[in-house]
């Protein structure tokens, strides 16, 4: 990987502590774990993105380059959060990849309809998660061009 | 990675015949055993998607699972075509990946803003292109689930 820079930020909205731990360890394998931030639900995700509440200091809540979004979250769920992000002109350019236990066709179609940039069913094993994170990192951070947030 | 994944139909819109050939070869090289169809500008792309004109036979123009879109094309450019696709409730679920020579920050920003699923700058070398197509294939074919939409006509 050659385009990893330290300003890269991945934000995961995930309420399951075990899934958070798995993701953290899988991102550690690609050397990106220090750039991975977590929020626990949809309301907190939107607060983070709007730099409200505990997220008013940019150092605590750097603007993400990529959002990983669970669908079934307490409070505001991932579907609502995705719709809000994609209808906000300041946020909509951030790619949102859904990472969920659901494999319902309706959730898949709805995710793309709302503007999601991928729908991934959570792998059942650590090895599977490492494969997903490696492929995801390679695609989004080496192949794809993301918006240069320093120039926003 | 998932095994036995359903073949994915790619549709590429690019006006440069050399680029179309290179992409076709890169697909073969990167062992993505999926089909790729080509259109040459934004007008043809919309005709294809709406099954108009020369694209009325579903066998010749299957609904794509993913669109690869050049930005700079004659007649109707990629920016206009992208906006039309993302404004149509019947088409907007199809992910559109911009694949272009442009590295302009404005094009990157605007493409995501209109609803592109990703933005890729065409690598200058063939090896680079093969790598990009391989990564694209691993992500969109192996890792990601795409919608299965009823296609009664096909």
Image (cartoon, coloured by chain):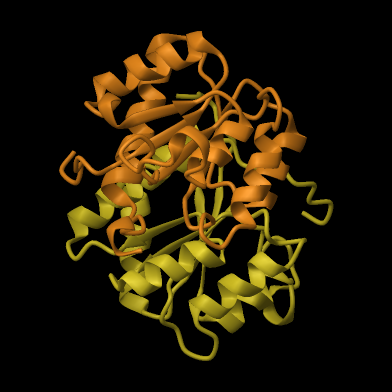
Chain colours: A orange, B yellow
Left-right relation of B51 to A46: right
Closest to the observer, B10 or A6 = A6
Quadrant into which the N terminus of chain A falls: top left
Q: Residue B100: x percent and y percent?
A: 35, 69
Quadrant into which the C terminus of chain A falls: bottom left
Residue B98 seen in the figure: yes
Q: Residue furthest bottom?
A: B75
Q: Residue A99: x percent and y percent?
A: 54, 29
Q: Residue A24: x percent and y percent?
A: 36, 18
Up-down relation of residue B19 to residue A96 (above or below)? below
Q: Residue at x 52, y 65 (%)?
A: B113
Up-down relation of residue B86 to residue A131 (above or below)? below
Closest to the observer, B83 or B141 = B83
Residue A119 seen in the figure: no
Q: Residue at x 52, y 44 (%)?
A: A96
Q: Residue at x 60, y 83 (%)?
A: B43
For residue B91, which quarter of the picture?
bottom right
Q: Residue at x 43, y 35 (%)?
A: A11
Up-down relation of residue A15 to residue B20 (above or below)? above
Q: Residue B18: x percent and y percent?
A: 31, 75
Closest to the observer, B37 or A64 = A64
Up-down relation of residue A80 to residue B15 (above or below)? above
């Amino acid at each position: 990987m050659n385009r990893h820079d330290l300003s890269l930020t991945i934000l995961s909205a995930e309420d399951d502590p075990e899934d958070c731990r798995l993701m953290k360890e899988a991102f550690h394998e690609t050397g990106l774990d220090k750039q991975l931030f977590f929020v626990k639900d949809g309301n907190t995700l939107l607060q983070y993105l709007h730099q409200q509440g505990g997220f008013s200091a940019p150092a605590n809540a750097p603007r993400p380059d990529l959002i990983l979004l669970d669908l079934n979250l307490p409070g505001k769920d991932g579907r609502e959060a995705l719709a809000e992000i994609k209808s906000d002109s300041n946020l909509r350019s951030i790619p949102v990849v859904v990472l969920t236990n659901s494999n319902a066709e309706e959730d898949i179609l709805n995710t793309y309809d709302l503007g999601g940039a991928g729908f991934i069913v959570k792998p059942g094993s650590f090895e599977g998660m490492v494969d997903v994170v490696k492929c995801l990192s390679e695609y989004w951070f080496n192949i794809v061009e993301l918006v240069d947030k320093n120039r926003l | 990675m998932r095994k036995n994944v359903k073949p994915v139909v790619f549709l590429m819109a690019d006006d440069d015949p050399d680029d179309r050939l290179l992409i076709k070869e890169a697909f073969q090289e990167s062992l993505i055993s999926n089909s790729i169809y080509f259109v040459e500008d934004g007008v043809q792309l919309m005709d294809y998607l709406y099954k108009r004109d020369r694209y009325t036979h579903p066998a010749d123009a299957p609904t794509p699972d993913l669109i690869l879109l050049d930005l700079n094309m004659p007649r109707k450019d990629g920016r206009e075509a992208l906006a039309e696709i993302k404004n149509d409730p019947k088409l907007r679920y199809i992910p559109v990946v911009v694949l272009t020579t442009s590295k302009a920050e404005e094009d990157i920003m605007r493409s995501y803003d209109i609803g592109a699923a990703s933005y890729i700058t065409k690598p200058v070398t063939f090896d680079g292109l093969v790598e990009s197509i391989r990564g694209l294939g691993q992500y969109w074919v192996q890792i990601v689930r795409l919608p299965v939409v009823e296609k009664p006509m096909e």
